[in-house]
Image (spheres, rainbow, N blue to C red):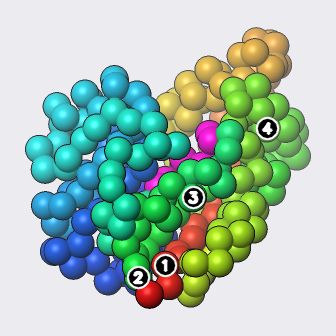
Amino acid sequence: SWTSPARHYLLEKAKVTLQDRILEVGCGTGAILGELAELNDLSFGIDVSQKYVEYCQKNFEKPHLAAADAYHLPFSDSRFDLVCCHYFLLWIERPEQIIAEIRRVLKSGGKLLIFAEPDYGGRIDHPPALESLGLAQIESLKLQGADPFMGRKLAGLISAFPEFHHTEIGIMGYQAGLKQDQAFWESEWQILTQDLSGVLAPTELDRLRQIDQAARQTGSRVLYVPTFFLFTEVKKE
């Protein structure tokens, strides 16, 4: 939900109409696809995971779904008015090939919206005792095959395709309540524990968890990961 302001900004900038064909590449569990389906009845989603596609089919009626490889999109040339992705490219080994494939299925004048790509190299943790969490997360993402610095690479990635123009890139700001609720904190640490179990010893994880909890209770905790968004469109022929 915290990425929604940038997402709404990009969708408004794209001037989506009821007639537009929309594709989300790497739709996952459908968190974004559900929003897109509310815009019109021509929303499509693909994910390499059959499990995720089946989950979306059970939870969303309107989107058209397929289990497919983003390196080989199962659509004809110039099929879509808008293609988007969200926290996707950091998991891709050859993102330039994905962008080329997205360009292929976009119409003349079609738009590409990259809603969110993080850059963990710019992560800010406070108090300083928690800075090792950021370093550990970078290491964990690398071990999982992800690129923790994808955010800063977006501009160069898109500029390699001269057929795109009117490109705009930005970084989401930081907003947080001084004291987050316990349920949110617990869910965040559940993810952290899964991600960092192979990088940090359980005793060290527990020590950092206690520091984090104390900082959140006093309202002094700051966690910020620069997260980039991008708008671009295909030059009209």
Q: For the residues marked 3 and 2, what is the alpha-carbon distance in whole angstroms?
A: 16 Å
| Residue position marked by numbered label 2 in the rendering | 109
Amino acid type of the residue that numbered disc 2 sits on in the rendered structure: Gly
| Residue position marked by numbered label 1 in the rendering | 234
Residue 131 at x, y = what percent?
85, 42
Q: For the residues marked 4 and 2, what is the alpha-carbon distance in whole angstroms?
A: 37 Å
Mark 3 vs 4, N-terminal side: 3
Is any atom of residue 173 visible in this view? no
- Label 3 residue SS: helix
Give the extent of the magenta segment: 85-92
- Label 1 residue SS: strand
Q: For the residues marked 3 and 4, what is the alpha-carbon distance in whole angstroms?
A: 24 Å
> What residue lies at 16% left-to-right and 31% top-to-bottom?
58
> What residue lies at 44% left-to-right and 87% top-to-bottom?
237
Give the side of residue 161 with respect to residue 86, left or right: right
Is any atom of residue 192 visible in this view? yes
Q: Quadrant of the N terminus?
A: bottom left
Most extreme residue toward the top is 202
